[in-house]
């Protein structure tokens, strides 16, 4: 602003100076021309007088007043440079004009214009014009006119004043305009520039004044809109960043957790791997030990039969026989374990009398027990109901438990095998997670009646921390390298699985030095009340007991004999499994593998029970149920739904009589079929 | 079977399976060796201190002390380190064989073994020209 003012003022000054100068020059020239004209007119008048030296006329001519009031004097000089006439001082006529000014005039035969200082220092213009005769250059005299410059100078001064005033006015106007311009344009522009710098530094909260004229207002509004948009997008970005950070944190935490889980799983896998490796090593040892004896003694007998005595031969053959037996048992255990692993362990349950199972088992083990002078006691409740069990598998369990007991009981110990009715499957919490005794338990719905079987010994007992491991298929107590009593530790794992398959539970109660008690439960076979009464009434006669049992089995068979079961499942293996389960118990079964076939068969055969799958192609179980229930001919047939689905209510609402989920407990299924027929 | 004779080569056999002990002793005694059998590591150690055998046959898998441990003890004992150790094992995997040889065993026989093979190995161990380990 200051520089601008200085520039404007100096420009204005220069203009005024140049204009003034030029004006002065022009005015001076005009005055000179006027002076020359006056002098020339006088010269024309006085020429003849000069030629004739008529000094009186010349004095008169000089004194003749001139209208121009600025003519100060008129002097006429003759041919010789004498004063011939003088307007102001007539007395000077005839005097030689030899002052410096006159000498300069006379030296030149032409017009001479000089600026002189007159009286009192007032400037004047002296104009001298030579007088020539027409057509010649002969100078006959000179006319000098003095013109006052005072009026001219005064006029010039006035003009200059006006110019200065105008200039000042113009400067003021320009400065005011500049100030206005600055306030309306420069300051807002500066503000915008500052705001832009702030925006560049990411300060988006700055707002510029919008109330500005014209395009500046538009610019300011655009600027504010821009910062606002920027701010919003920045906020959005910040929000997204925070969100992203949060997600990253969550993901990191999740990853961390996953890593820990993986580590844990890895550790578990390593443990399993170690157990498997130990197991393999153990199995190898268990297979090779009897094989070693068999091979060695066979070779001994083959090499030199004559050198052996008869008793030695018998002894060695006996060894070979028992070791072969041991090997066979081991291989069958291994096969069982692999069946369990593959989920192919099958139990064909039927109503079983425990006495009939326990006694033969003990019979085969008595020799072994006797070799250690161990007494085996049997305590079986005479009121014991029959249980649902696979007789072969049950024998396997009992043999295994008693065999173990003999193995771990020292000389002259006592082993007790007891059986009694029980109202629950197991004491609360069997299993590693439930805080109860170590063991395995079925997860099938609890039933009303069980039989509890116990094998108790007076052996060395088992430390509490080993309890769960003995049921694990790879978890034989102790390390095979350091612990003796042999075995792969498969027996209990197999027994546990068998009992669970039967819908029962098995567990151990033991402490070091106090002996061990292995207990297991089996579901009671549902026995018609009438049969029980019959049995009780004839119990008195011991000899009649066997007959009574015979009756019982017959009665049980009667409940199922000839009853027809329609099995509907699109999975052939299920149909086969159910058929295998039901036929040995006296049921007649018909299988079909589609909904439409099922409806046709149901109408045709009117079976006693229908076992129905839900998830089948085309016509599903629900549709079959609807169709069966809508037809009076089939509406009365009880339908047991057997499905992997967990939608009991829907099936029951459609008229199903019972609902069992796959995979099913065989005992439970049988019980339900029995209840329905 | 012959009666033990103090000048016969003395063999110590340790195995927790009584039947293995029985068959091994029948085979070795039949070849004129003097055999002492023990059924665990501790007894084997006691017997080793009582009388130094020419050859020992140790089962790897025994109750309280494994044949590998016994083998290490024998080989680190200045008085016993030249006893020829044959390990008998039901573990036939290569890793286990290496483990046995690393423990300093001179020979390694997998169960089930042939009587003749075992006898041949023991006799080779007894031969005066056998290379020192």
Image: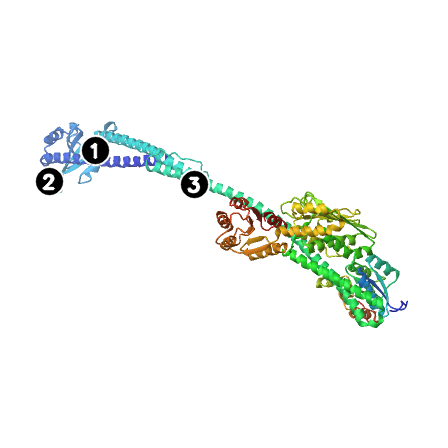
The residue identified by callout 3 is: A230
Specify the subunit that label 1 lies on.
A
Residue at the outermost right position: B6
The residue lying toward the viewer, choosing from A435 and A334, is A334
Give percent across and percent down for residue A387.
68, 49
The residue identified by callout 1 is: A125
Left or right: A154, with A191 as reference point: left
Give percent across and percent down for residue A491.
71, 55
Element type where label 2 sits in the image = loop
Element type where label 3 sits in the image = helix
Give percent across and percent down for residue A658.
57, 46
Taking the spot 34% from the left edge, 32% from the top edge, the residue there is A179
Whether residue A393 is visible, yes or no, is yes
The residue lying toward the viewer, choosing from A6 and A265, is A265
Rounded to the nearest angstrom, the CA distance separating label 2 from label 3 is 98 Å
The residue identified by callout 2 is: A133
Left or right: A14, with A320 as reference point: left
Rounded to the nearest angstrom, the CA distance separating label 1 from label 3 is 80 Å
Specify the subunit that label 3 lies on.
A
Rounded to the nearest angstrom, the CA distance separating label 2 from label 1 is 26 Å
Give percent across and percent down for residue A35.
17, 34
Element type where label 1 sits in the image = strand
Mark before the other along the chain sequence, 2 or 1: 1
The residue lying toward the viewer, choosing from A207 and A242, is A242
Mark before the other along the chain sequence, 1 or 3: 1
Q: Are marks 2 and 1 in contact (CB under 8 Å)?
A: no
Whether residue A437 is visible, yes or no, is no
Left or right: A323, with A232 as reference point: right
Specify the subunit that label 2 lies on.
A
Kindly indicate the quadrant of the structure image that contains residue A146. Answer: top left
């Amino acid at each position: 602003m200051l520089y601008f003012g200085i520039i404007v003022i100096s420009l204005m000054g220069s203009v005024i100076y140049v204009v003034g100068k030029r004006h002065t020059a022009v005015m001076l020239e005009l005055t000179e021309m006027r002076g020359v004209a006056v002098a020339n007119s006088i010269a024309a008048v006085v020429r003849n007088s000069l030629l004739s030296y008529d000094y009186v006329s010349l004095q008169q001519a000089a004194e003749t007043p001139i209208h121009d009031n600025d003519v100060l004097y008129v002097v006429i000089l003759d041919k010789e440079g004498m004063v011939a006439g003088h307007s102001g001082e007539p007395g000077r006529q005839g005097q030689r004009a030899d002052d410096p000014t006159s000498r300069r005039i006379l030296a030149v035969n032409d017009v001479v214009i000089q600026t002189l200082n007159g009286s009192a220092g007032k400037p004047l213009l002296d104009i001298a014009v030579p007088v020539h005769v027409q057509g010649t250059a002969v100078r006959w005299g000179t006319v000098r006119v003095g013109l006052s410059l005072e009026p001219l100078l005064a006029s010039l001064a006035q003009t200059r004043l006006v110019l200065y005033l105008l200039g000042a006015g113009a400067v003021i106007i320009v400065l005011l305009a500049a100030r206005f311009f600055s306030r309306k344009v420069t300051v807002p522009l500066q503000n915008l520039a500052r705001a832009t710098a702030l925006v560049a530094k990411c300060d988006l909260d700055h707002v510029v004044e919008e109330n500005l004229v014209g395009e500046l207002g538009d610019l300011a509004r655009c600027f504010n809109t821009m910062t606002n948009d920027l701010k919003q997008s920045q906020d959005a970005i910040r929000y997204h960043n925070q969100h992203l950070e949060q997600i990253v944190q969550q993901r990191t935490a999740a990853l961390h957790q996953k890593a820990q889980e993986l580590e844990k799983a890895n550790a578990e896998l390593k443990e399993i791997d170690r157990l498997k490796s130990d197991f393999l090593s153990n199995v190898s040892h268990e297979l090779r030990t009897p094989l070693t004896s068999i091979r060695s003694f066979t070779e001994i007998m083959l090499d030199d039969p004559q050198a052996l005595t008869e008793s030695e031969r018998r002894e060695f053959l006996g060894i070979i026989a028992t070791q072969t037996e041991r090997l066979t048992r081991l291989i069958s255990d291994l096969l069982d374990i692999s069946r369990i692993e593959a989920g192919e362990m099958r139990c064909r349950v039927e109503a079983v009398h425990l006495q009939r199972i326990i006694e033969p088992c003990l019979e085969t083990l008595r020799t072994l027990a006797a070799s250690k002078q161990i007494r085996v006691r049997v305590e079986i409740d005479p009121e014991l109901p029959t249980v649902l069990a696979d007789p072969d598998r049950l024998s396997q369990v009992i043999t295994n438990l008693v065999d173990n007991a003999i193995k771990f009981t020292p000389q002259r110990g006592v082993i007790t095998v007891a059986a009694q009715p029980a109202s629950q499957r197991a004491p609360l919490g069997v299993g590693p997670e439930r805080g109860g005794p170590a063991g395995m338990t079925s997860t099938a719905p609890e039933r009303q009646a069980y039989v509890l079987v116990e094998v108790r010994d007076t052996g060395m007992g088992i430390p509490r921390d080993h309890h769960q491991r003995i049921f694990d298929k790879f978890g034989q107590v102790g390390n095979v390298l350091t612990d003796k009593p042999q075995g792969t530790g498969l027996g209990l794992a197999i027994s546990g699985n068998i009992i669970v398959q039967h819908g029962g539970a098995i567990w151990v109660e033991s402490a070091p030095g106090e002996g061990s008690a292995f207990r297991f439960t089996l579901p009671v076979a549902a026995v018609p009340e009438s049969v029980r009464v019959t049995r009780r009434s004839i119990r008195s006669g011991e000899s009649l007991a066997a007959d009574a049992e015979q009756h019982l089995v017959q009665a049980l068979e009667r409940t199922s004999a000839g009853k027809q079961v329609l099995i509907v499942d699109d999975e052939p293996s299920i149909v086969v499994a159910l058929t295998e389960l039901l036929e040995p118990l006296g049921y007649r079964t018909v299988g079909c593998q589609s909904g439409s076939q099922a409806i046709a068969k149901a109408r045709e055969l009117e079976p006693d029970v229908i076992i129905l799958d839900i998830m089948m192609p085309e016509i599903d179980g629900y549709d079959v149920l609807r169709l069966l229930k809508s037809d009076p001919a089939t509406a009365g047939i009880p339908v047991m739904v057997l499905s992997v689905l967990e939608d009991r209510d829907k099936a029951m609402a459609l008229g199903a009589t019972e609902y069992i989920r796959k995979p099913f407990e065989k005992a439970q299924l049988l019980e339900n079929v029995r209840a329905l027929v | 079977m012959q009666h033990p004779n103090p000048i016969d080569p003395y063999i110590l056999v340790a195995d927790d399976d009584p039947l293995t002990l029985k068959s091994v002793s029948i085979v070795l005694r039949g070849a004129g060796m003097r055999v002492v059998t023990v059924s665990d590591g501790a007894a084997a150690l006691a017997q080793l201190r009582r009388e130094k055998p020419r050859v020992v046959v140790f089962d790897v898998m025994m109750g309280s002390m494994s044949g590998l441990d016994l083998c290490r003890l024998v080989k680190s004992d200045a008085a016993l380190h030249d006893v020829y150790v044959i390990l008998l094992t039901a573990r036939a995997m290569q890793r286990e064989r290496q483990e046995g040889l690393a423990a300093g065993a001179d020979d390694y026989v997998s169960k089930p073994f042939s009587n003749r093979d075992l006898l041949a190995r023991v006799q080779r161990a007894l031969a005066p020209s056998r290379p020192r380990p």
